[in-house]
Structure formats: structure tokens, C-alpha cells
Image (tube, rainbow, N blue to C red):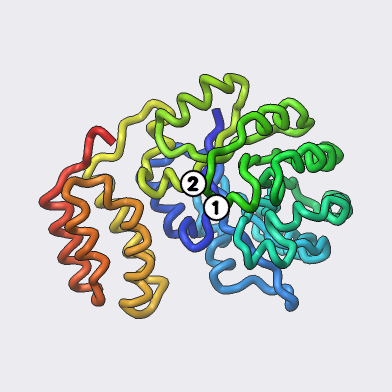
Amino acid sequence: MKLYLAPLEGITGWIFRSAVHECFGGFDKYFVPFIRPNQMGHLSAREKKDILPEHNRGMYTVPQILTNRSDDFVRTAKKLKEYGYEEINLNLGCPSRTVAAKGRGAGFLACPEKLDAFLYEITEKADVRISVKTRLGVEDPEEFYRLMDIYNKYPFEEVIIHPRVQKDFYKNVPNMEVFDKAARMSRNPVCYNGDIFTVEDHARFTEMHPGMERVMTGRGVLSDPALAREIRGGGPAKKEELRRFHDIVYAGYCEEMSGDRTILYKMKELWTYLAPVLTEHKKYAKKIKKCEKCAAYERIVDEFFEQEEVISSR
């Protein structure tokens, strides 16, 4: 079984990915949150930092591009190849309304003819291996059969399927009936993505889909950064490992960002997922949420790890 870390915008940047890899490991591929090509053809400061080889040592990292313009994709893929990347992922799954309204991400799925022409162009002109991360459609899961006919025309590295439509966002349950049919239809390797939050979730999925060899998880890793290791039969995260993981992420943000408010915004976001791992987490989560200075934050985190233990039944 191959395990992939999903790209989550604003969360799974290089600092988070590096900490997961260093402290827990277990992933075969780490996907970079999407690069959005601009008119000047330049990478943003965030995008450059995310894909720098020195920020991805020891990891098989796959950059992701969000666009509906083939020339932008090809130009960006060429730039990424200069950094040493041979595999690029196309984002056809982002459900954000602002993204979809511009016909990008999952919004591009509403225009199958344009998508077909786009895929033809990029597979002909981009000198890299291409994978696709997709949803089932925009409004109706039945849209996906038409999309699969299109995907089957092209030699993708893999098709990563999140079995919800754009309108679902992350609500409702994944449509496994359509996923199963699509997996059988696909001429390209298929990877499953959706609602793998625990070892038990993964076990249920593999029991029902014994032939599926690739699984992607994202949100589950935010609350359990050792998830991939556990799926592979390793132990759950120990308190000292979680402390080290936190400290690596925190030090990375302190080095890369300026101002207590900016740093704490990122750490508070992390704790919304991570806090329930420890006992008496509600009390400390409230304190962390109220923090305005890094010095106060550090004292609360020290106390949290000193006084509480990992919840073993999670």
C-alpha cells in the first residue's frame, strides 16, 4: 500500500511536511499545496519556499498546479523541472467557491470539452509525468463517468479521486459506489482520497477494496501526525514525539514569519486539530486561543505537555 500526504492550502507547507517526515514518516509521497500561475510567470515567495529542494530533503515531493490555462501549466511545469521535479499534479479537486467560480479546481469539471483540450495540450507539451487530483463533478456524481472517459485518453501517473462533488465541499459521505465503478473504468492507476482519519478508517477501506494500492490522507494527519506510521503497523505518537513535532513546526514558523500575531495564527490553527490528542485539552485550547504574545504561548504549551498525557483510546 502506498500512502500519500494530501496538499492542504495554508497548512501542509514545507515546515509542516518536514516535521511530519522527520518525526513520524510513513508517507511515500508528499504533495505540495497548489501553485497558482500568475501573468508574470513567477513563483510567489511562499511557492518558492515550498518547492526548494533543501526544504524537501528525503521526501518524494510532488508540486501541484491550479490553473485552467494550458500554457500556464506548461510554463510552470518547466520551471518546476528546473528545480528537479519530474512529476507534477493537476488540481481538479479544490472545492472553494472563489476557485470554482473562475473555472479552476473542481470548477473546471463543469467544462469537460475545455478540460479535454487542456489535458491534450499539457500531456503533449509538458515534459514531466502528470497526475490528476479530481472530484466526481460539480453537482452530480454521475458527471464522473464522462470525466473518466476523458481521463482515460491520457497516460497519467495516477488519478487521485476524492469521491465528492464540488458542491459537497467536505460534507456528506464519499460516494463509494461511483468511486468503485470509476476505479474499474480507469486505464490509469487510481488513488483513493477521502475521510481516512484513523487506522480503523484505513482498515475498513482496505477490507472493502483489497485491490486498491494507493491511499491519500490529509485532515487525519493534522490531528494524528503519526497516522501513516500507525497504518504501516508502527506505534502511535508518544508525548515526547508530539512535543518534538510541535517544536519543529513552531521554530520553523518563528524563523520564516515576522510578528507574534502571524506566528500564533499558524500555531492556533494547528492546535485546533492537535489539542484533542492530549487530556484536559479544552482548558489549554482556550488559553492558547487567547494568546497574543509568543512568550505567553510558550509558557502555556510547556504546561500543557508537562501536565497532560496522550489519550490512549483515540
Q: Residues within 10 Å of mark 1 (few under 14, many from 20)?
A: many
Residue at screen point 88% across, 52% down: 113
* Quarter of image, res 28: top right
* Outermost residue to the left: 307
Q: Position of residue 70 (x, y in %)?
A: 82, 61
Residue at the image point whose x is 57% and y is 52% from the top: 169
Q: Where residue 301 sits in the image (x, y, percent)?
A: 20, 60
Q: Secondary structure at mark 1?
A: loop
| Residue 296 in the image: above or below residue 239 | below
Residue type, mark 2 in image: Gly
Location of mark 1 (residue): 7
Secondary element at image label 2: loop
| Distance in Å between CA atoms under marks 1 and 2 | 7 Å
Q: Which residue is mark 2?
A: 218
Number of the label disc, if any, that sits on residue 22: none
**191 above or below 308?**
above
108 above or below 220? below
Nearest the viewer among 115 and 60 is 115
Q: Are marks 1 and 2 in contact (CB under 8 Å)?
A: yes
Q: Residues within 10 Å of mark 2 (few under 14, many from 20)?
A: many
